[in-house]
């Protein structure tokens, strides 16, 4: 394990500190003085066009940021990751989500810790594809001989957010008449509502859990099993004999996990389980067997296209010099805003309703990865780390929280994501509605960058105190990501872009972006509190005063 570099002790950090003090943000002036700014600060990334020109950077600032990447060893660490180095130090694991999307037959083969990783990945992909084809083609049938019409993925965190986000994004590609649903929350409402209108005879459950120990997922899987048995028994489809129940589970439950022994203990035939490996972090796993629901609903070919998109970006990062390396540049910009401008959050604003779950997906990817206070050698970080990621699709957000981005006192860098061609071209009295939508995307980034001066407001006839209220300071940084259309391949590129942005930031800060110890304490305490909420006096006594009072409130109000 190489010791992390303290970024704040690098010459580049000092340069950036000085530049932050001396350079006044002036997007109007910078664009006026440099006719080539838009072109010079725009970059291709596979099928994506990424315009960084409306960020608060000059050539000098960008050059210093690139020196920061060099001085903290971003390229070297990326190479180490691709080779299978155990970058996840606290769990002593390789970090190889990039191996999940290497094309079949990639040469030389990737062998890590004595394992032919490529062969393992391709064999699971083939098994997923074959299974998905059976379900889609009606060769896999429910226990009463009915074709599957609904697939319900039961998982949480990385075993849910990726599949649900991709499914929502690529629904127009769902071509087999199979609907996917996603149950994650241990709030029983989630399972109850998602199964309320389903028929057990044509429902297939996928229990997706890397560890197969997660409380929410195993509880929901047991509830789903009861729902299946109850429905099939009530309709007379099966008897309540043990072997009939086991047969029903074999036809209606499959699993995705790294712990195939635990899958068998649950009663799912290991022949119907799809594996992955401890070198895939949960939040980096949508492109593993965790994407089985996608392979079924969208088809194995669309799933392979998604993986090809991820690989496009992996290759870009591996082969492109830092100064044109888009994920590195975007990661550096995030460091610039977070560590030098004091930005605490980062908005992601897709101008695509299909990407409505993308911000939630990114929250786990970025915040579970980089919400850390210690570095990979266990020493404290030397500067602020992970910012809060959030967002909603435009134009909805425009009528909700954009006010604060435009005129609030906090700097909120924002990524806008848009697509030239819509999934559903519609026109309203001759007006192409997608064009109207895109006009909003362009208008917002323009307004944020260039604002509106008091003189411009006055020129419109406004006077007095209203002038200040109607003035926009501008210099609110945005990145525009534009692509021809939201296809599986483009979506893979988008996801991989943010994975590598996250990696760049984590490396600069010296943190392990691949563990998540911060989620453990709450899980432990929930297990200690569960008996207390059930009324166990000694468990109640063991709680702090506030928790005891809340438990008392619960008991008083429980019907
Ligand atoms: O509690 C956090 C977490 O461990 C995530 O990192 C993970 O994606 C999620 O739980 C689900 O874990 P599993 O796939 O093992 O059920």
Image: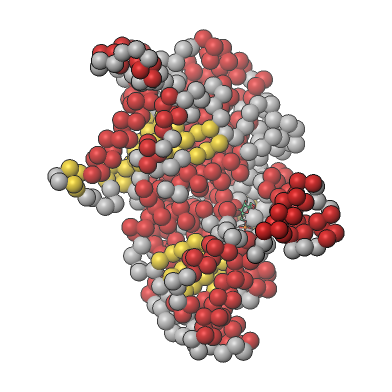
Q: In the rendered view, how is the structure colored?
A: secondary structure
The residue under the point 80% across, 47% down is 544
Q: State whether residue 41 appears in this view.
A: no
Give how far across and how far down residue 137 sits, in percent. 38, 75
Where 305 sits versus 461, above or below? below
The extreme top residue here reads: 22
Where 553 sits versus 463, above or below? below
**Image side of residue 181 versus residue 352, left or right:** right
**Image side of residue 555 versus residue 198, left or right:** right
* Displayed-image quarter of ligand 1: bottom right
**Image side of residue 521 versus residue 501, left or right:** right
Q: State whether residue 465 appears in this view.
A: yes
**Image side of residue 279 versus residue 353, left or right:** right
Give how far across and how far down residue 443 sits, in percent. 30, 30
Q: Nearer the viewer, residue 195 or 370?
A: 195
Q: Quadrant of residue 534?
A: bottom right
Give how far across and how far down residue 142 sits, in percent. 47, 80
The residue under the point 65% across, 26% down is 383
Where 20 sits versus 338, above or below? above
The residue under the point 51% across, 25% down is 410
Q: Quadrant of the C terminus?
A: bottom right
Q: Quadrant of the N terminus?
A: top right
Q: Nearer the viewer, residue 307 or 521?
A: 521
Q: How many marks?
A: 0
Give how far across and how far down residue 302 sits, in percent. 38, 58
Q: Nearer the viewer, residue 552 or 54?
A: 552
The residue under the point 80% across, 63% down is 536
């Amino acid at each position: 394990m190489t010791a992390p570099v303290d970024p704040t002790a690098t010459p580049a950090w000092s340069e950036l500190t000085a530049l932050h003090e001396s350079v006044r943000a002036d997007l109007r002036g910078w664009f006026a003085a440099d006719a080539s700014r838009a072109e010079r600060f725009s970059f291709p990334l596979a099928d994506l066009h990424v315009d960084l020109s409306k960020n608060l950077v000059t050539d000098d600032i960008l050059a210093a940021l690139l020196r920061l990447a060099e001085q903290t060893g971003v390229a070297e660490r990326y190479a180490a990751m691709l080779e299978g180095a155990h970058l996840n130090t606290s769990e002593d694991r390789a970090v190889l989500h990039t191996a999940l999307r290497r094309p079949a037959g990639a040469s030389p083969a990737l062998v890590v810790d004595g394992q032919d990783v490529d062969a393992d990945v391709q064999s699971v992909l083939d098994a997923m594809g074959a299974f998905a084809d059976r379900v889609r083609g009606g060769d896999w049938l429910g226990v009463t001989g009915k074709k599957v019409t609904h697939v319900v993925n039961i998982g949480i965190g990385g075993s849910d957010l990726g599949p649900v986000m991709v499914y929502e994004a690529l629904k127009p590609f769902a071509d087999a008449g199979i609907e996917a649903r996603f149950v994650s929350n241990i709030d029983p409402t989630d399972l109850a509502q998602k199964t309320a209108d389903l028929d057990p005879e044509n429902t297939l459950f996928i229990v997706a859990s890397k560890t197969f120990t997660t409380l929410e997922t195993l509880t929901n899987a047991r509830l789903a099993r009861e729902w299946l048995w109850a429905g099939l028994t009530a309709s007379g489809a099966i008897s309540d004999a043990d072997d009939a129940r086991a047969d029903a589970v074999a036809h209606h439950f499959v699993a995705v996990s790294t712990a195939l022994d635990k899958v068998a203990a649950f009663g799912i035939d290991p022949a119907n389980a799809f594996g992955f490996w401890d070198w895939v972090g949960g939040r980096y796993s949508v492109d593993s067997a965790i994407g089985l629901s996608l392979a079924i609903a969208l088809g194995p070919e669309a799933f392979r296209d998604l993986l090809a998109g991820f690989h496009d970006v992996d290759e870009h990062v591996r082969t492109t010099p830092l100064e044109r390396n888009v994920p590195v540049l975007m990661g550096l910009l995030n460091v610039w805003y977070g560590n030098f401008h004091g930005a605490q959050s980062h908005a992601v604003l897709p101008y695509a309703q299909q990407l409505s779950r993308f911000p939630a997906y990114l929250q786990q990817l970025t915040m579970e990865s980089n919400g850390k206070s210690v570095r990979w050698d266990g020493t404290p970080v030397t500067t602020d780390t992970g910012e809060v990621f959030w967002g909603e699709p435009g134009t909805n957000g425009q009528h909700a929280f954009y006010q604060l981005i435009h005129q609030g006192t906090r700097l909120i860098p924002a990524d806008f994501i848009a697509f030239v061609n819509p999934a559903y071209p519609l026109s309203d009295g001759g007006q192409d509605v997608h064009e109207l939508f895109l006009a909003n995307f362009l208008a917002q980034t323009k307004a944020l960058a260039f604002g509106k001066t008091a003189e411009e407001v006055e020129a419109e006839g406004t006077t007095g105190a209203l002038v200040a209220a109607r003035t926009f300071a501008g210099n609110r940084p945005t990145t525009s990501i534009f692509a021809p259309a939201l296809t599986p391949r483009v979506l893979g590129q988008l996801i991989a872009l943010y994975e590598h942005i996250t990696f760049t930031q984590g490396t600069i800060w010296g943190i392990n972006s691949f563990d998540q110890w911060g989620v453990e304490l709450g899980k432990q305490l929930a297990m200690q509190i569960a008996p207390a909420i059930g009324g166990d006096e000694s468990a109640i006594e063991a709680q702090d005063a506030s928790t005891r009072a809340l438990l008392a409130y619960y008991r008083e109000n429980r019907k």
